Image: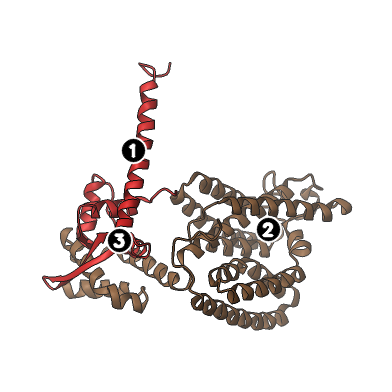
Chain colours: A brown, B red
């Protein structure tokens, strides 16, 4: 029985990287067996195995992305999500032609679309981060991770009823939630200033587009006109150049931070490409993804070569 | 200074009176928290990895007991300093709360 118990623990430890296992597996296994013996258990608890799996995956991730970078990525993701959530929620709340007059389209309570559910989750996440309620924050971010998929499924089953949110928005907020969950978001002055600048820029951008046309704008307008495929492409080229500069300056941590932080934008751009060009878009996307993998490998190589810090440094201070 | 997380605090506090191995740390953390916190093995070793990388904890020998490998961990000077700072911060908070309680009107708020 002990042999079976030990082999089940050893299997769970396979989630850890080999280098870590070579150094620690026997010691950790002994502790697991000590705990099981003290509790009089002859087999591992399911929660114990799950926790080992999560901890092992987290250790694997830490090999490629140090904790300081993960915390910075998380802070940037949270800030980006909050700024866009505020902007999209505001745009939804502006006086617009009644959605009820658009034939089959109907509102979501007082709002134009159920996108408000996602935006509200991000605003709650922001308040929790400010209060330092880390556990509840993670819980809300997990809900925010699955909410877009739930909305998408609901929307498909109710075709034509809701004016959004667009697929770009859903994919964007999903990837953003994954990144926010990678670390502990610390909202520093630097992040706060970035949020103010971002919110200001968005208000100006929406105003510039919407005021002359005096027409209805939804969050889809953002992806069509502000973060269009062309704007995003230009942004990716700039990001690539900046990441290369960081790499050459032996700041692999910053290159990695930039490379990961643009992923939600890249995901939204991928959706736009597929929507615009259909099967040609899928082919183009495959090429883009191959390029992105090469870019990612390059960034990781830079990060390793320039010795990204393993902990301690706060990259967004 | 950022507030120290509870598992980190308990691990450092458990090591304050001398080196300990993994299971002894889990047992000591449970005692220190009055039975409230039972550290998971994965959480413990993640915290130890991080604390070692930060120079607050160091490995302090290994031995095999009843066929099981035991690695001992000890507090470094930096770890003792961080624990002292956290204790001082907690004491200051407790003193503030205690002072406020003394200002509370007898019989509570009407």
Subunit that carries the residue with mark 1? B
Judged left or right of residue A100, residue B79 is: left
- Quarter placement of the C terminus of chain A: bottom right
Q: Which residue is mark 1?
A: B91
Residues marked 2 and 1, same chain: no
Q: Which mark is residue B57?
A: 3
Subunit that carries the residue with mark 2? A
Query: Is A8 located above or below residue A41 in the figure?
Result: below
> Which one is closest to the eye, mark 2 or mark 3?
3
Which residue is outermost to the right?
A: A212
Return the x and y of residue A178 as percentages of the image width and height: 53, 63
Q: What is the count of numbered marks?
A: 3
Which residue is outermost to the front?
A: B77
Q: CA distance from mark 2 to mark 3?
A: 49 Å
In-front residue for pair A273/B63: B63
Disc with the residue nearer the chain's start (3 vs 1): 3
Q: Which residue is mark 2?
A: A165
* Residue A268: quadrant of the picture: bottom right
Q: CA distance from mark 3 to mark 1?
A: 23 Å
Q: Residues within 10 Å of mark 1 (few under 14, many from 20)?
A: few
Which residue appears at 47% of the width and 54% of the height?
Answer: A138
Query: Is A137 located above or below residue B101 in the figure?
Result: below
Q: Residues within 10 Å of mark 2 (few under 14, many from 20)?
A: many
In-front residue for pair B83/B49: B83
- CB within 8 Å, label 2 to label 1: no
Name the element at disc 1.
Answer: helix
- Quarter placement of the N terminus of chain A: bottom left
């Amino acid at each position: 029985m002990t042999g079976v118990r030990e082999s089940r623990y050893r299997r769970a430890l396979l989630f850890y990287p080999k280098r870590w296992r070579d150094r620690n597996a026997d010691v950790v296994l002994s502790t697991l067996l000590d705990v099981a013996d003290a509790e009089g258990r002859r087999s591992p608890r399911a929660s114990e195995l799950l926790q080992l799996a999560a901890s092992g995956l987290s250790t694997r991730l830490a090999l490629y992305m140090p904790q300081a970078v993960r915390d910075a990525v998380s802070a940037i993701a949270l800030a980006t999500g909050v700024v866009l959530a505020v902007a999209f929620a505001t745009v939804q709340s502006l006086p617009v032609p009644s959605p009820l007059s658009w034939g089959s389209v109907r509102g979501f309570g007082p709002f134009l679309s159920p996108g408000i559910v996602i935006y509200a989750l991000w605003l709650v996440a922001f308040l929790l981060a400010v209060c330092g309620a880390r556990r509840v924050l993670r819980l809300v971010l997990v809900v925010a991770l699955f909410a877009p998929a739930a909305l998408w499924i609901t929307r498909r089953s109710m075709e034509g009823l809701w004016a959004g949110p667009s697929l770009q928005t859903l994919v964007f907020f999903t990837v953003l939630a994954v990144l926010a969950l990678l670390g502990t978001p610390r909202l520093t002055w630097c992040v706060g200033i970035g949020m103010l600048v971002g919110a200001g820029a968005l208000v100006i951008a929406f105003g510039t587009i919407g005021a002359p046309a005096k027409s209805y704008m939804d969050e889809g307008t953002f992806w069509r006109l502000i973060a269009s495929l062309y704007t995003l492409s230009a942004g990716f080229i700039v990001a690539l150049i900046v990441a290369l500069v960081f790499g050459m300056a032996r700041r692999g941590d910053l290159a990695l931070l930039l490379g990961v932080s643009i992923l939600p934008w890249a995901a939204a751009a991928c959706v736009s490409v597929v929507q615009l060009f259909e099967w040609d878009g899928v082919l183009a996307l495959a090429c883009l993804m191959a390029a992105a993998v090469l870019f990612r490998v390059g960034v990781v190589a830079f990060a390793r070569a320039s010795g990204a810090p393993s902990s301690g440094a706060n990259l967004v201070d | 200074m950022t507030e120290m997380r509870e598992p980190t605090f308990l691990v450092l506090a458990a090591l304050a009176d001398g080196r300990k191995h993994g299971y002894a740390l889990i047992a000591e953390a449970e005692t220190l928290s009055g039975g409230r916190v039972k550290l998971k093995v994965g959480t413990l070793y993640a915290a130890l990895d991080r604390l070692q990388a930060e120079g607050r904890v160091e490995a302090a020998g290994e031995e095999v007991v009843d066929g099981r490998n035991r690695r001992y961990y000890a507090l470094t000077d930096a770890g003792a300093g961080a624990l002292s700072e956290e204790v001082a911060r907690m004491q200051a908070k407790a003193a503030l709360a205690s002072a406020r309680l003394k200002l509370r009107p007898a019989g509570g708020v009407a």
